[in-house]
Amino acid sequence: MPFAHPEFLVSTDWLAEHLADNDVRVFEATVFLRRGERGFQVESGRAEYESGHIPGAGFLDLQADFSDNDQRLRFMMPSAEAFAAAAGRHGISESTMLVLYDRSGSMWAARLWWMFRSMGCERATVLDGGWTRWTGEGRAVSTGAATYPPATFTPTADPARFADLAEVRAFLESGEGGGSCLINALGRDQHSGADGGGTYGRAGHIPGATNVPAMELTDPETGRYRPAEELAPLFEDAGADRTRRVVTYCGGGIAASSDALALSLLGYENVAVYDASMSEYAADPSLPLVVD
């Protein structure tokens, strides 16, 4: 069973052959979330990148450069103008062959992939297996500075790729989802509430939501996305229907983007990420949560 859109991923073999191509731009997108007394703290992966990265790869700082930092919540999608300016500074145009990777199961790469696709960069891709596979295969690593000349990014925003609280409220009020499906990309204990709600202040999941954890989408040894014949049943069992809108959520739109990428690989066309996710939803005590 092949993916409907295999072009959303590139292999390490392909990248090794095309690293020197003039129109290829490679970027690491690693972020670390460190658990502290006040929840998760954001830590850029730049230090790890500087200690060794794919030759020719630049670094994209999701929090600093590609998030709306005027908002209280982390990792929120910036305006089209701010996004385009950041992309252009890094040498990325809307027609760039963009390859994204990270060191954390491809969730951070998937987040930027979803953002770039939402802004009209149709050649944005994720390196299948990311850093784990690249280094596991013994491929070249560089510590040299890697930058690209500035470019002009002309955005074509597709707001339908993101959902907001109003859409989630409509889902709740419809009872049966109103023709849509809501999928939680967090871990199973977080979804069920078994974690006690320590991460986002309240335990459980949004009523009616099903669960496809992003960490279960990839092979833990190679880092690659699981094949279509393994991914498809996960989403079908979760109620995903190709004729309905599928909204993914997590804590802050990161794991949800990996679910959105997997759904897109499988050919789901009407997919959205709830950008603010549990960071917004769980903070409002008037909004219901379900503990299994």
Image: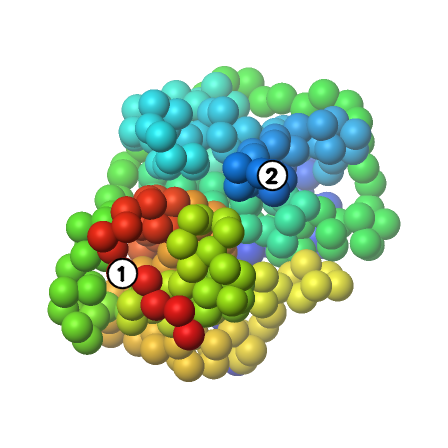
Q: Position of residue 78 (x, y in %)?
A: 34, 31
Give the class, few, some or many, for how many residues have Cα within 10 Å of label 1's Cα (few <14, many ≥20): some
Task: Decide which of tag 2 and tag 1 comes sooner along the chain.
Answer: 2
Q: Amino acid at mark 1?
A: Pro
Give the class, few, some or many, for how many residues have Cα within 10 Å of label 2's Cα (few <14, many ≥20): few
- Which picture quadrant has residue 41? top right
**Which residue bears the numbered disc 2?**
36
The residue positioned 70% from the left and 52% from the top of the image is: 12
Eyeballing the image, is 255 above or below 33?
below
Cα separation between marks 2 and 1 = 26 Å
Eyeballing the image, is 46 above or below 187?
above
Q: Is residue 265 visible?
A: no
Determine which of the numbered discs, if any, sits on residue 204 in the image. none
Q: Nearer the viewer, residue 18 or 284?
A: 284
- Which picture quadrant has residue 33? top right
**Which residue bears the numbered disc 1?**
288
The residue positioned 79% from the left and 29% from the top of the image is: 51
Q: Nearer the viewer, residue 191 or 122?
A: 191
Eyeballing the image, is 14 above or below 100?
below
Q: Nearer the viewer, residue 92 or 199?
A: 199
Q: Position of residue 77 (x, y in %)?
A: 35, 36
Q: Amino acid at mark 2?
A: Gly
The residue positioned 58% from the left and 67% from the top of the image is: 216
Q: Position of residue 176 (x, y in %)?
A: 19, 75
Name the colouring of the figure: rainbow
Q: Nearer the viewer, residue 16 or 165?
A: 165
